Amino acid sequence: MKSVQKWWAEPTNRQVAAILIVGFLFRSFIAFWLPPGFDEAYYYIYTQNPALSYFDHPPLVSLVSAIGIWLTGEVSQFTIRIGSLLLYPFTLYFLYRAAVHLFSVRVGLLTLAIASVIPIFQLGFGTFTLPDSPLMFFWTLTLWVGAVEFFPRDRTVYIPSYRVALIGLLVGLACIGKYHGFLLGFGLIGFCLTSRRHWAVFRSPWTILSFLLFLVAFSPVLYWNSQHDWISFTFQGNRSVPNRSFKFSKVIDVAFAASLYLFPTFGLPLWFVSIREIILTVSRRFSNSIHSFVLWTSTPVFIIFTLIGGYQQILPGWTMPGFFSVTPLLAWYASRWRSSVLKRWLVGSTLAIVALLLFALSHVTLGTLQKPGQYALFGGFVAPQDDPSVDLMDILQLRREFSRSPQLLTALKNADFMFSNRFHMAGHTAMALTPLYSTPMTCFDRRDLRGFAFWSTAEQWLGKTGLYITADKFQTQEDSAAEYVPYFEKFTKLGEVELRRGGVVIDRIHVFQGTNLLKPFPRPY
C-alpha cells in the first residue's frame, strides 16, 4: 500500500494514470455502441474454432477476442473487444516507459498523449479486436526492454545481457500476434548492424538463446503451417506480389491516406519528422544511436508497405505499427516547441478528433446523416442504400428480432448448420445467432473462404439441413440463393428479418432452409 501511495504522490504518475484512464473510458464507450466490423465478426469465428494458428493470421487474435466472452459469458460487440480494451493501456505505458528511458519524462508524457489521441491508434490498436492489439502489446514491450538493454544508464560500454534473450521471446510473441512482428525483428538486427557500439551482441551467447526463444514462441504457427501446406505464409506472401505496374502516384495516395487516418495535425508531422530523421541519421552514419534505434524499429514498416501500395492495394492498418513506434521522435521535436504552441496543437487536435469520432458514432448507431431517419440532422443527406455504414450489422438487433419469430427460431434449433455467402457475413450471423443455439457456422463461397476452408470439410454437411442467411444487397441485387438450390433436395425461403436505424429499415436479412445437402459445395482452396 505504501508503495502505491508513493507512486501516486508523483505528479507525473498521476498525469500518466489520468491519460490512460480517460482514454480507456472513451474507447470503452465507442466499443459498447459501435457494431462489429467485418474482420471483428470473422475473428469471433476464430474463438469457436481454437487452433495453434489460422489461415490468414497467427493465433493471438483468437485469444484476445475470447477474453471478454470468457469473462462475461456474453457475445456482443463490446465483449469481443474487452481484450483489446484491456491490453491497450499497457501498450501505451510500455511506449511511455521506452520514451522516458530514451529521451526524458517530458518526451515520454508527450508520446503518451499523442499516441492516446491519434484516431487510428485508438480504434485499430485499442478498441477493435484485431491482430494489431496483441502485436502492439508485445511490440512496445520489446521497445522498452530494448531501450533498457541497448542504452544502459550506468555504463557507456555496451555488454549484452539476459535481456537480449528476452527480446527474442518478445519478438516471437509479437509475430504470433501478427506477421508484422518480423519487421520488428528485422529492424532490431538492422540497428545492431549499423551501430558499432552494439556489435558485441552478435558475439554473445544470449543472442543464440534469443533466437531459440523466438522459435519456441513462434513454433505454434510453424507447426500448424507444416500440417497445412504452409498455406498461411503463401496467402500472406501473395498479398505482396504485384498485381499491376508500379505507379509512384499510388505511393503518394497511400502516404496521404495514412496522414488522414492519423489525423492531419499528427500525420503530416510524423511524415516530416520521419523523413528528416532518416536523412540526418544516414548522413551522419547512424552516429545518434537513440534516434537510429527508434527509426529502425518503426520506419521499415510504413516505408515498405507504402511502397507496396504503389503496385498493390494495402489496408490502412498495415503501416500503422511503424507510425506508432516513431511517435517518440515526434514528441522529442514537440518538446522543444513553445508551450503555447504545444498546448494549442494537442488540445485543438484532441477536441477535433473526439468530436469527429463521436459524430461518426452517432451516425453509425442513430443515423444522424441518414435520409430519412428519426434522428437525422437537417433532414439527412445519405440514403441507406448508398451508405456503407449499414454494412456494420447490428448483431444484437438481429438476435432480438430473430428470437421473436417462432418459425425462424424453430428452424435454427433444428438446423444442423448455418451458412452464408461471404466470410464476414458468416461472422456477423454467428455472433448474432450462435448464442441462441450453438448451431455451427460455415461459408459457401466459390471465391474466398478464408479460415472456413479449414474449420470443416466440404463433405461434412452431406445429408444435413442448413440455414442460408444473407444480407439484402446479396439477395435482391443478385439472387444469391439461386446458386445453392441445385445442392439441396429442397430449398425454401423462410422469411426476412428487418434491421432498423433511426426508425427506418436499412437492411433485410433473408433466411432460407436447405434440406438434405446432396453434394458438396465447391471450394476455391
Image: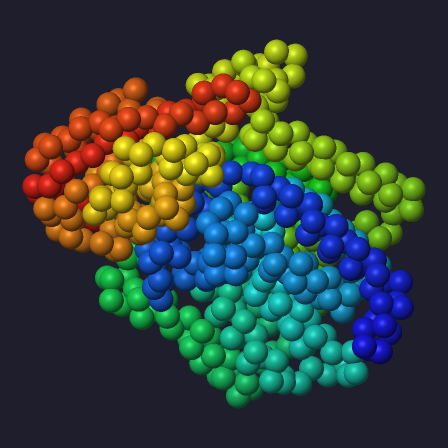
- x and y percentages locating residue 211 in the rendered image: 47, 78
In the image, farthest residue toward the front: 406
Residue located 84% across and 53% down the image: 335
Above or below, comparing residue 112 to residue 498 in the picture: below
In the image, farthest residue toward the top: 379
Regarding residue 178, the answer to whether it shows in the image is: no
Residue located 33% across and 58% down the image: 49
Above or below, comparing residue 75 to residue 498 in the picture: below
Q: Is residue 261 left or right of residue 480?
A: right
* Camera-side residue of 209 and 7: 7
Tally of numbered tags: 0
- x and y percentages locating residue 222 in the rendered image: 34, 69
* Camera-side residue of 146 and 388: 388
Residue 52 location, quadrant: bottom left
- x and y percentages locating residue 19 in the rendered image: 77, 53
Residue located 58% across and 39% down the image: 33
In the picture, which quadrant includes the N terminus? bottom right
Residue located 42% across and 75% down the image: 215
Above or below, comparing residue 524 to residue 146 in the picture: above
- x and y percentages locating residue 60 in the rendered image: 46, 62
